[in-house]
Image (cartoon, grey):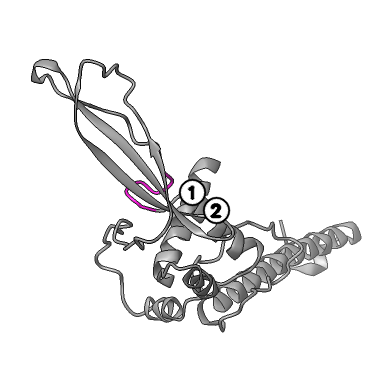
């Protein structure tokens, strides 16, 4: 306990108090430096200019965490949206519909037929469900076409159809190959989304920057969920 009258301290007590206060000051300085560092990063994220490669602010006491930046920070409209968020609150959160995308009809279709696990020898094929996913190789886009024949059971006891394979974005029409390329181009090759959009347009598919941003954001959510 620190006394109010310093004249009552012995030499050893005085040295002990000075040592204790020095330790407190050192710890407070570390906290202040850390807070300044966080404020600097926040200001750069919100008000920084668009960069093709973001240079991280180094802090030897802070652990590096992957995917901490806003995924589509390189979109001008998103930077403006962040500035406006200080003055208004988001009211309605609409569920993103990933299925609204016109896939070019001239793209190559690679067809996969998935038959039900049930035996269908005594059944009548009454149709099929067709699901198309936009996929990509490093050189070209193509479409994975999944066909699932539907069978009617005898005596009208129901319909049999195979289960649709799981997808990273349920309800979406994007294949895991394209999501993988998006993440690699952005976080490994430091290619902003607007440049990726131009690259894909040269390959024959026009995708909006906001769509690419949503795909990247949802992919990162999956990484966070799997890490928990």
Q: Residue at x 60, y 58 (%)?
A: 184
- Residue ID for mark 1: 176
Judge from the rendering whether residue 10 lies leftward or rightward of residue 190; answer left or right.
right
Q: Would residue 31 be visible to someone looking at this image?
A: yes
Q: Position of residue 154 (x, y in %)?
A: 13, 16
Write down the region rendered in magenta.
166-173
Judge from the rendering whether residue 93 lies leftward or rightward of residue 28; answer left or right.
left
Quarter of the image where one finds residue 49? bottom right
The residue lying furthest to the left in this view is: 155
Mark 2 lies on a secondary structure that is: helix
Q: Position of residue 169 (x, y in %)?
A: 39, 49
Relative to the observer, which residue lies in front, 172 or 11?
A: 172
| Vertical arrangement, residue 158 with respect to residue 129, above or below | above
Q: Position of residue 206 (x, y in %)?
A: 41, 70
Q: Position of residue 111 (x, y in %)?
A: 40, 43
Q: Residue at x 60, y 79 (%)?
A: 51
Judge from the rendering whether residue 124 lies leftward or rightward of residue 33; answer left or right.
left
Relative to the observer, which residue lies in front, 29 or 215?
A: 215
Quarter of the image where one finds residue 130? top left
Q: Would residue 220 be visible to someone looking at this image?
A: no
- Residue ID for mark 2: 180
Q: Residues under labels 2 and 1: Cα distance?
A: 6 Å
Label for residue 97? Answer: none
Identify the main secondary structure in magenta.
loop
Q: Counting other residues with Cα less than 10 Å from the Cα at mark 2, is it few (<14), some (14-19), or many (20 or more)? A: few
Whether the residues at callouts 2 and 1 have beta carbons within 8 Å, the answer is: yes
Mark 1 lies on a secondary structure that is: helix
Image quarter in which the N terminus is found: bottom right
Residue 167: within the magenta? Answer: yes
């Amino acid at each position: 306990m620190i006394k109010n009258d310093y004249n009552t301290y012995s030499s050893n007590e005085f040295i002990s108090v000075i040592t204790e206060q020095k330790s407190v000051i050192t710890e407070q300085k570390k906290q202040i430096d850390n807070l300044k560092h966080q404020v600097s990063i926040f200001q750069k994220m919100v008000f920084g200019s668009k960069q093709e490669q973001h240079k991280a602010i180094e802090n030897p006491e802070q652990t590096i965490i992957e995917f901490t930046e806003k995924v589509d920070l390189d979109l001008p409209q998103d930077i403006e949206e962040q500035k406006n968020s200080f003055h208004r609150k988001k009211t309605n959160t609409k569920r993103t519909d990933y299925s609204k995308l016109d896939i070019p009809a001239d793209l190559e279709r690679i067809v996969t037929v998935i038959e039900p696990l049930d035996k269908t020898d005594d059944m009548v094929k009454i149709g099929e469900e067709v699901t198309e996913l936009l996929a990509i190789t490093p050189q070209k886009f193509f479409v994975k076409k999944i066909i699932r024949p539907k069978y009617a059971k005898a005596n009208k006891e129901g319909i049999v159809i195979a289960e649709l394979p799981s997808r990273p974005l349920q309800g979406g029409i994007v294949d895991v190959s394209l999501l993988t390329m998006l993440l690699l181009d952005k976080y490994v090759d430091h290619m902003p989304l607007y440049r990726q959009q131009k690259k894909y347009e040269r390959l024959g598919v026009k995708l909006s920057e906001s769509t690419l941003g949503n795909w990247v954001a949802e992919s990162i959510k999956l990484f966070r969920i799997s890490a928990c």
